[in-house]
Every structure is written in structure tokens, then in C-alpha cells.
Image: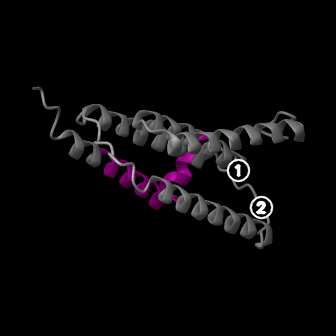
Amino acid sequence: MNGGFPVSSAVLTVIFLVALATTVAGALIAVLTTRIIRSVCGLALCCIGLSGLYYFLHSPFLALMQILIYVGAVCITIVFAVMLAEPDEPAADPQGAGSGGWLAISLVAGAGAFVAAAWLAIQGPWAPPAARTGDGSLWAIGVQLLTRYSLAFEVISLVLLVAIVGALAIARGGRDHR
């Protein structure tokens, strides 16, 4: 049973795969696109998929904070910073030198990181899943937030503060109205 409703394991597998595909698709969009607004949208999509994965790890609080902090605050702050930044495009490399070399190096490094992570996931010792300690209600989350997880809440607040200060630093110059 999941939250009082009977759900088959096939449905849970499909939902998990959708969350996983959303995370990977968002990451690919964020990395492979050339426009920064599309990259921010890919980051937001990746964070939404990641929140679904947190939910499957029995962490509804982290799933909610992932959406509120990273999608609702950090991505929106980046969008505001981009909108307030200079509209000039960066100068293109006239010869296109170095593009192929860096691409090959990054592909080899990415493939190596993937193989290492996959090997660790297959060979590493996995701890048994933790027992569920709360019912996930708003009251229980509030009590845990203000007692047990107060340090994590403050760290999340610092991440939000850094994002806001960064957006203000970028926007301080404003647009040049010629």
C-alpha cells in the first residue's frame, strides 16, 4: 500500500521510470542546449524529476523542498538575472579552434564517470532501507523541520540567499539603454 491506496508494483515501476526519464531528459537539455533560458528550463525539469526520485526514497519533505527551493527559487532567480543581464551575444570563435578536442575529452571523461558510478552501484554494499518514522503530514514535517532538521533548513536558506545575492549582483549594472 502506498498512502492508503493499493498500487501494483508495475504502476510504481512505470512512475519511477517516468521520474528517472524526466531527470535525465532535463539534465541533457540543460547541458546540450546553447541558449541559457532553455538550459534553465532543463535544470528545472531535472529538479522536478529529482524530486520524484526523492519521493520514491520515502523522503516527501526533500521532494517538496527540491521543488520549492531549486525550481521555485533558484531557477526563477536565474531567469530574472538573465532577463536583467546584457543582451549582447558572446563573440564567436573565428577559426572554431579547439571544439573537437574538448568535445572528445568531455565525452571520454563523462563515459569514465558513468562507468565508475555504475560499477560502484553494482558492486557497492547497500544498506537496507530505513524504516518509516512519520506519517508525512504537514504537522509532522513542521515538527521535524523545527527540531531535527533545523540545520538542513538553514543550509537551504543560505543556498537561496546566495542565489538572490548573485542575481542582484548581475542585475546591479542593469541594461545599457543606448
The answer to whether residue 160 is magenta is yes
Q: Looking at the picture, does residue 131 appear above or below residue 66?
A: below
- Residue that numbered label 1 is attached to: 58
Q: Which residue is painted at 31% across and 36% down in the image?
A: 82
Task: Assess whether residue 145 is covered by the magenta stretch.
Answer: yes
Which amino acid type is shown beneath numbered disc 2? Pro
Label pair 1/2, CB-CB below 8 angstroms: yes
Above or below, 160 against 130 in this view is above
Question: Whole-percent x and y of residue 135?
Answer: 70, 46
What residue is shown with label 2?
Answer: 129
Determine which quarter of the picture holds residue 120. Answer: bottom right
Marks 1 and 2, the one that precedes in the sequence? 1
> Of helix, strand and loop, which mostly describes the magenta segment?
helix
Please give the name of the residue rendered at 65% of the width and 49% of the height, measured from the top-left corner.
54
Mark 1 element type? loop
Q: Quadrant of the C terminus?
A: top left
Q: Which mark is residue 77?
A: none
